[in-house]
Image (cartoon, rainbow, N blue to C red):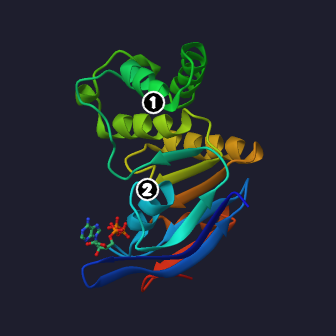
């Protein structure tokens, strides 16, 4: 199993957001998490990726992680190319490999023309492309995406699914928080987060 979560619980004060959640993620599968606003989807993702600690429970991951948070963690005064260099250094990706991957991602998501542009000057959708591609840079075994296509135009949205399809063929598991229920058929399994539990 690529990821095993056991008995995850999390409360904020007296608010029990996650109640004894257990699940497993398999290599090469696409999972969705739906649930109403405030149901705890982002909280669960932050615990899965290790950004937050659960009050109790364990997560075990056998592989590399890529995470695209709901709020893009970008630096307004750095350019797109500088973001690739900065994140590659953090991931420990050698320069030549980073350059190849970054070029491929810039081409695939059609924003090479903004390579030398500062993030502050990019549109919201283009910032979101960068947010997503930075999660793809380490070629993860598990890709965790929190509403990744908010603000994407239709062509970019389709390119997103094309790219995740290729990743799954290579054995990558993809976990997506989404509000778009019209795309249920794309997923191997959709979890509904309700009353702190996954259904
Ligand atoms: N740092 C925090 N401190 C206190 N409460 C928090 C904190 N983070 C989240 N919460 C609360 O936990 C609950 C779940 O929030 P979370 O952001 O995980 O929901 P969500 O399902 O991702 O919502 P949305 O669909 O609106 O993105 C909410 O009631 C929220 O107010």
Tell me the residue at 59%/76% (across/down). Answer: 22
Q: Is residue 94 above or below residue 154?
A: above
Figure check: 53 above or below 118: below
The residue under the point 23% across, 29% down is 120
- Relative to 197, say whether 116 is above or below: above
Which quadrant contains ligand 1? bottom left
| Residue 44 image point, x, y percent | 45, 67
Q: Which residue is mark 1?
A: 90
Where residue 35 sits in the image (x, y, percent)?
44, 75
What mark, if any, has residue 147 been given in the picture? 2
Total marks in image: 2
Considering the numbered disc 2 on the image, is that residue within a helix, a strand or a loop? loop
Circle 1 Cα neighbour tier, 10 Å, few/some/many (<14 / 14–19 / ≥20): few
Q: Which quadrant of the structure image shows residue 101?
A: top right
List x then y, in percent, for residue 149: 45, 49
**What is the CA distance from the residue labelled 2 to the residue labelled 1?**
24 Å
Foreground pick, 140 / 184: 140
Mark 2 or mark 1, whichever is nearer to me: 1
- Mark 2 nearby-residue class (10 Å; few <14, some 14–19, many ≥20): some
Is residue 154 rendered to the left or right of residue 25?
Answer: left
Under circle 1, the secondary element is helix
Would the CB of label 2 be found within 8 Å of ligand 1? yes
What is the x, y in percent for residue 78?
Answer: 28, 23
At 53% across and 23% down in the image, what residue appears? 102
Q: Indicate whether 163 appears above or below 110.
A: below
Tell me what residue is drawn at x 40 percent, y 63 percent.
53
Between 135 and 112, the one nearer to me in the picture: 135
């Amino acid at each position: 199993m690529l990821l095993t979560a056991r008995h995850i619980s999390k409360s904020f004060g007296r608010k029990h957001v996650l109640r004894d959640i257990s699940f497993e993620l398999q290599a090469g599968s696409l999972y969705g998490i739906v649930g109403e606003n405030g149901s705890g989807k982002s909280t669960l993702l932050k615990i899965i990726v290790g950004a937050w600690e659960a009050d109790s429970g364990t997560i075990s991951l056998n592989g590399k992680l890529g995470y695209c948070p709901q709020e893009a963690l970008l630096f307004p005064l750095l350019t797109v190319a500088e973001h690739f260099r900065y994140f590659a250094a953090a991931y420990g990706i050698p320069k030549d490999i980073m350059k190849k991957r970054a070029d491929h991602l810039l081409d695939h998501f059609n924003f090479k023309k903004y390579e030398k542009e500062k993030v502050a000057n990019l549109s919201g959708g283009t910032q979101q492309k960068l947010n997503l591609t930075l999660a793809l840079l380490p070629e993860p075994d598990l890709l965790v995406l929190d509403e990744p296509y908010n603000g994407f135009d239709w062509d970019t949205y389709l390119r997103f699914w094309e790219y995740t399809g290729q990743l799954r063929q290579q054995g990558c598991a993809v976990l997506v928080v989404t509000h778009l229920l019209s795309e249920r058929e794309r997923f191997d399994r959709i979890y509904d987060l309700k009353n702190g539990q996954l259904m």
